[in-house]
Image (cartoon, rainbow, N blue to C red):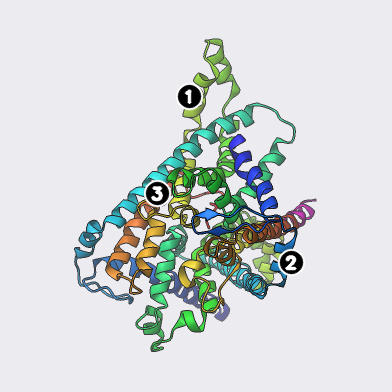
Amino acid sequence: MSVRAALGVIGRYVFAGFVLVFFALPLLWLLTAPFDTAPSVQVSVPDFTLENFRTLWDNPYAMRSLGNSVIIAAGTMVITLVLAALASYALSRVRIPGRDTLLYLLLLLSSIVTGTAAMVPTFLLMTELGLIDRQLGVVLVLTGGLLPTAIFILKDFMDSTPRSYEESARVFGASSLQILRHVVVPIARPGLATIAVWAVVQVWGNFLVPFILLRSPDQQPAAVVMFTFYTEGGQPNLGLISTFSLLFSIPVVAMYLFVNRRYGFRFHGGIKR
Amino acid sequence: MLVIAIFLLFPAIWTLYLGLTNWRLTGLAAREPEFVGLENYTDALTDPDFRNSLVLTLAFVFFSAIVGQSILGFALAWTARKLRPALRSVVETVVLLAWIIPASVVAFLWLALLDRREGTLNALLGTDGTAWLLEYPMQSIIVFNIWNGTAFSMLLFSSALASVPPSQFETARMAGAGTFATLRDVVLPNIRGHILTNTLLITLWTFNVFAPYLITAGGPQGRTEILGVYIYRVALRDGALGQGAALSLIMIIINLVVASVYLRLLRERRS
């Protein structure tokens, strides 16, 4: 082995080590602090306890906000899935001039719609519709933002459904909706599953939309409520927040592992902010 | 389609109109908007806070996305290829976790890390009681954003590098090309499109990032008040909705300009 190659190997491991420390340190704290009797902001071997989970369980806002997160994520996922399946099927079967351009345009715009730039328009629209401080408003706004990407990804799956299957179903007298339900959906199932998980991950981590649209603490999802734990009284309750952080992170990490094992992790650029 | 139209077109047109009024949110009841013409726009352009936040945003995007995430992401993708599979998957998983975990949790992790009294960073560096968020606020949120977002560039460059024909690496090795020459003559020509795509997406995302608000709330003294945070303060905290609508439009226009410049570059590359 030449000197240069040896230096290359050393450089590689030093770099990998540096990256590991940089990325793993905060994660280690997230893993250890919840089980620590006296959590400090330092990473340390915990003096093992489950007391923090009890405190969390007893805190009414914490558990309710996790419930709110589930409601908002599930609602957004279901509406996105149904609308995206219908729209992508229609777009895949009907020829409209300029269809692909339209899809690209929507895809580009969608990263702005629910984003920071459209904060004020979103707020105004929801005020006018009377949906401020209602979870329905949050669900609708998030759905609008996710739909273009969902349609875009699903259209690929729909395109690969052989038309001959549908034609034979039609010969037997199936209606369009029946064809969609009994022929297309089963074939596009991997695509639908990907979209479902992707939508939940997007919504679960979203802070801005519920932050500007929801006012009362009993409506807010975990992403927002957690932040109020921190500012209340100035002193953060480390045991409570770290435990809450861990519980709040587990669902998305579990879903990532599930998708990774099942389909390989390709979120086509998973639009996360 | 209808849903998209409602949530896209209607707010756009309405924002255009409200940006020309002095609509305010006072308490619970909003006052009737009065037409004030282009006043909001001239106000914005002369407001030192707006110019401040524009400069901060440019610095934030440049250092955290273009320099930080893309270079670190590429270096990771490049290095990971040659690591042992077990180590490689550990490194990649850790970087991915930083990306998957919800923004609120990530923000809180960094608050703990940078804590003044006994934060992990102070303990590690032996810098007793350094208040990182007060002394280096911008650097702090830049590092935070690199931590949170690098995974995307890593994933994209990993698949880009996998698409480079192995025979070209082999040829370069036979010709005795070093790492630098290989990168320049073999890798770069092959992954130009990926580099542009990556730059377009992470620029747009970073430009629209709001999470630093969770760490510094724009402070101290507006030193981390990037555009999103600035618009939030003006429009939704101080209630100047007309002004906020104008600012939103300015930001959307910047977004569109950035996107169209990149798309043009990408098209030239293809033809």
| Residue matched to label 1 | A181
Disc 3 residue crowd, few under 14, some 14–19, many 20+, Cα 10 Å? some
Identify the residue at horizontal 52%, vertical 82% (top origin): B136
Q: Position of residue A202 (x, y in %)?
A: 48, 51
Residue named by callout 2? B42
- Confirm or deny contact between disc 1 and disc 3 (CB under 8 A): no
The stretch drawn in magenta includes residue B253: no
Evaluate whether residue A269 shows in this view: no
For badge 2, the amino acid type reads Thr
Tell me the quarter of the picture where residue B87 sits: bottom left
Circles 1 and 3 on the same subunit:
yes
Q: Which residue is mark 3?
A: A255
Q: For residue B184, what is the image quadrant?
A: bottom right
Identify which amino acid the numbered label 1 is placed on.
Answer: Arg
Q: Could you say which is closer to the camera, residue B167 or residue B97?
A: B97
Q: Name the residue nearer the viewer: B28 or A6.
A: B28
Looking at the rendered structure, the secondary structure element under dot 3 is: helix
* Vertical relation: A147 (above or below) B35: above
Q: Tell me whether circle 1 and circle 2 mark residues in contact (CB < 8 Å).
A: no
CA separation in Å, label 1 and label 2: 55 Å
Say yes or no: labels 3 and 2 on the same chain.
no
Give, as a single range, the part of the protein colored magenta: B263-271
Q: Position of residue A213 (x, y in %)?
A: 48, 52
